Image: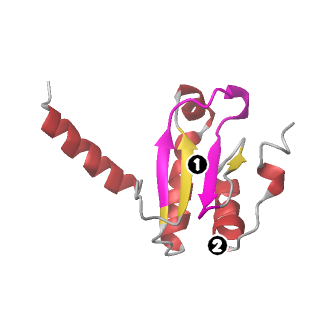
């Protein structure tokens, strides 16, 4: 069995390896749902796509974090995007291509991709 310190070191290594950041000084936050239902629906690829797109765009003030179950399994993968003090936007049924578009149009351009939002899924 690993010690608590060893487990913390492994966690830190993995977070750096996959580019996940939890930075309270960030001006924008992307939260990817990674519960079992989200992972089964492809959330791991979505999280990787967001971290890669954000890194490639040089967006040093965007934090990407992972969360648990949002209670809406049929809409997974679910991603929440909050920029500054703006109201959070919930994107549903995400994939890597949609993630790239959200980074380009919403996070960089400031325009919500409305057809991917939870409001459009109703």
Q: Quadrant of residue 107?
A: bottom right
Q: Which residues are magenta?
A: 63-85
The crowding category of the residue bearing disc 1, from other C-alpha atoms within 10 Å (few below 14, some 14 to 19, many at least 20), is many
Q: Is residue 15 magenta?
A: no
Q: Which residue is mark 2?
A: 108
Kindly check if marks 1 and 2 are in contact, taking CB atoms under 8 A apart as contact. no
In magenta segment, residue 72: yes
Return the x and y of residue 21 as percentages of the image width and height: 40, 56
User: Is residue 122 shown left or right of residue 38?
Assistant: right
Taking depth in this image into account, of 119 and 96 the one nearest to the observer is: 119
The local secondary structure at tag 2 comes to helix
- Residue located beneath label 1 in the image: 46
> Would residue 11 appear left or right of 58 to someone viewing this image?
left
Residue at 26% x, 50% y: name it.
Answer: 13
Looking at the image, which residue is at 50% across and 38% down? Answer: 67
Q: Which quarter of the image is occupied by the N terminus?
A: top left
Alpha carbon distance from label 1 to label 2: 18 Å
Return the x and y of residue 117 as percentages of the image width and height.
77, 48
Label 1 or label 2, whichever lies nearer to me, is 2
Q: Is residue 26 above or below residue 14?
A: below
Direction from residue 75 to residue 64 in the image, left or right: left
**Which residue is found at the position 22% from the left and 41% from the top?**
8
């Amino acid at each position: 069995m690993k010690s608590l310190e060893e487990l913390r070191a492994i966690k830190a290594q993995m977070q750096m390896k996959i580019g996940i950041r939890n930075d309270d000084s960030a001006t924008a936050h992307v939260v990817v749902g990674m519960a079992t239902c989200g992972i089964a629906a492809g959330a791991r690829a979505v999280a990787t796509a967001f971290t890669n797109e954000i890194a490639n765009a040089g967006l040093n003030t965007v934090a990407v974090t992972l969360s648990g179950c949002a209670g809406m399994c049929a809409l997974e993968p679910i991603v929440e995007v909050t920029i500054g003090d703006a109201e959070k936007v919930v994107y549903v049924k995400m994939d890597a291509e949609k993630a790239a578009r959200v980074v380009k149009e919403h996070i960089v351009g400031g325009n919500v991709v409305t057809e991917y939002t939870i409001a459009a899924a109703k």
